[in-house]
Image: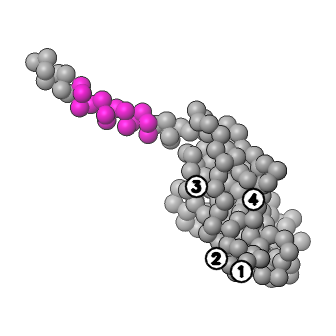
Amino acid sequence: MWAIGLGAILLTLPVMAQRVAGQKAADSRVEKAFLDAETRVHVRWSGQPEQVMERDHSADQCDGDESHPCVEASASQLIVSADRRSVGWTAEYYECCQNYPIPFVLVIAREGGIVQRIQVGLGIFDWGFVDGGRKVALFYDTAHSDLRPTCVLYDAQTWKQISTWYPGKSVVPPRWAKSFVKDMQ
């Protein structure tokens, strides 16, 4: 009987270890996040050493020539969610005819790694976490002429678009888009 009991314990230990490891990852919180002098993103997750996040290589807008390679030029707009489970930033790239980078990709990291990159085809000039981090809202537009000012709300688990708002859709913006109205004037 002892051998059967010990066997059952030994079989159960890996399952328990997986659960504990899974719980630890799910409970991972952002303890510290900042941009260094070279605009690289540094994040320290609970119980982990500080991590320098990789530069983003996913932007479709890059023209790929030698003067403007398809590699993130800089990062900006670093925000930690209220629940401290997520951190996000915009990845900026050079675009044709611009001598400064434009924020084309919103990068979201959770539990030690990048979980989502959002690209809308235009500059992402403002963004934020909503409802403690359960949703992500962003404001995008053309770089100079304000041709398509648009606000979008995403579910931060499924990454499905929940809502869209733009001037003219309604007089009063939804609560989640009100902070972006200043960007549209």
Residue 12 is a magenta residue: yes
Residue 84 is a magenta residue: no
Q: CA distance from mark 3 to mark 2?
A: 18 Å
Q: Nearer the viewer, residue 6 or 144?
A: 6
Q: Are marks 3 and 4 in contact (CB under 8 Å)?
A: no
Which of pointers 4 and 2 lies earlier in the amino acid sequence? 2
- Secondary element at image label 2: loop
Q: Position of residue 125 (x, y in %)?
A: 79, 66
Which of pointers 3 and 2 lies earlier in the amino acid sequence? 2
Q: Residue furthest left?
A: 1
Residue type pointed to by label 4: Ala
Q: Position of residue 23 (x, y in %)?
A: 46, 37
Question: Vertically, is 87 above or below 61?
Answer: above
Q: Position of residue 10 (x, y in %)?
A: 24, 27
**Quadrant holding the C terminus:** bottom right
Residues in magenta, as a range: 9-22
Residue at 62% in and 36% down:
49
Which of pointers 1 and 4 lies earlier in the amino acid sequence? 1
Residue type pointed to by label 2: Asp
Q: Nearer the viewer, mark 1 or mark 4?
A: 1
Residue at 30% in and 29% down:
13
Instruction: Quickly name the residue at label 3.
Output: 114
Instruction: Quickly name the residue at label 1.
Output: 65
Residue type pointed to by label 1: Asp
Prevailing SS of the magenta stretch: helix
Instruction: Quickly name the residue at label 4.
Output: 75
Residue at 65% in and 40% down:
50
Instruction: Quickly name the residue at label 2.
Output: 60
Q: Nearer the viewer, residue 96 or 68?
A: 68
Residue type pointed to by label 3: Ile
